[in-house]
Image (spheres, rainbow, N blue to C red):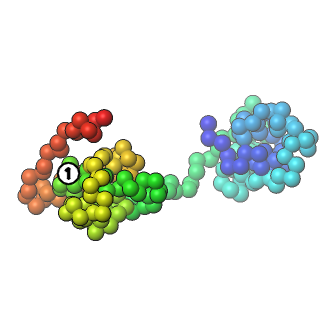
Amino acid sequence: MTLPLMPKATAVWLIEKTALTFTQIAEFCGMHPLEVQAIADGEVAQGIVGYDPVANGQLTPQEIARCEKDTNARLKLLPSTLPVAKRARGARYTPVAKRNDRPDGIAFLLRNYPQLTEAQIAKLMGTTKETIQKVRDRTHWNTANIKPRDPVILGLCSQTDLNAMVTQANERLIREGQAVPAVPPPSEDEAA
């Protein structure tokens, strides 16, 4: 069950401003009825300012009135009207501990997904085109230690993002009339 925002503060407001039973308030706020009674007695939640669920769009006055008339009725939380935040795509922060793994992920993408453009790899891995070019040309400062490893397993990108980029690249190749390369099976090094 979804709980209201700031349940204890909401319980304080409901105790002070309504004639709801402790059980009704407890079930709505996800608390035990004895905890609600302790709040009403002033033993718990001293100094907590009540949070108005009506003003914040979690309850309607009609819903409170309906439950005040019938002690067996239960309050129903209104559905949230807040938009669900989508995570921004593209370059993002890579922790310091994973930055040395980035060239390994780039090498994996260059070898297994040649249809991806440098811009797509840069967006997926959060790196620059210059770094991708250095890994491709084997002029990267750490070329001797670069081993192609799956960036999803390394935690540098999500499988969903990788699949979306590969699909986008394949569609581009089909539009241009080129053949879509087959994905090679993983080598024994990658399987381990």
Lateral position of residue 85 relative to residue 192, left or right: right
User: Would you identify the image quadrant in which residue 141 lies?
Assistant: bottom left
- Work out which residue is located at the far bottom of the displayed protein and give it: 130
**For the point 86% across and 42% down, which residue is it?**
44
- For the C terminus, which image quadrant? top left
Count residues near mark 1 (Cα–Cα under 10 Å), then give few for <14, some for 14-19, many for 20+: some
Element type at marker 1? Answer: helix
- Work out which residue is located at the far front of the displayed protein and give it: 144
Q: Position of residue 37 (x, y in %)?
A: 86, 36
Of 69 and 131, which appears nearest the observer? Answer: 131
Q: Position of residue 189 (x, y in %)?
A: 26, 38
- Work out which residue is located at the far top of the displayed protein and give it: 72
Q: Which residue is mark 1?
A: 111
- For the N terminus, which image quadrant? top right
- Can residue 171 be spotted in the picture? no
Q: Position of residue 85 (x, y in %)?
A: 50, 56
Tag 1: residue type? Arg
- Can residue 144 be spotted in the picture? yes
Disc tally is 1
Vertical order, 136 against 148 (above or below): below
**For the point 23% across and 35% down, which residue is it?**
188
Q: Position of residue 20 (x, y in %)?
A: 81, 40
Of 176 and 145, which appears nearest the observer? Answer: 145
**For the point 56% across and 56% down, which residue is it?**
82
**For the point 65% across and 54% down, which residue is it?**
57
User: Would you identify the image quadrant in which residue 124 lies?
Assistant: bottom left
Of 11 and 78, which appears nearest the observer? Answer: 11
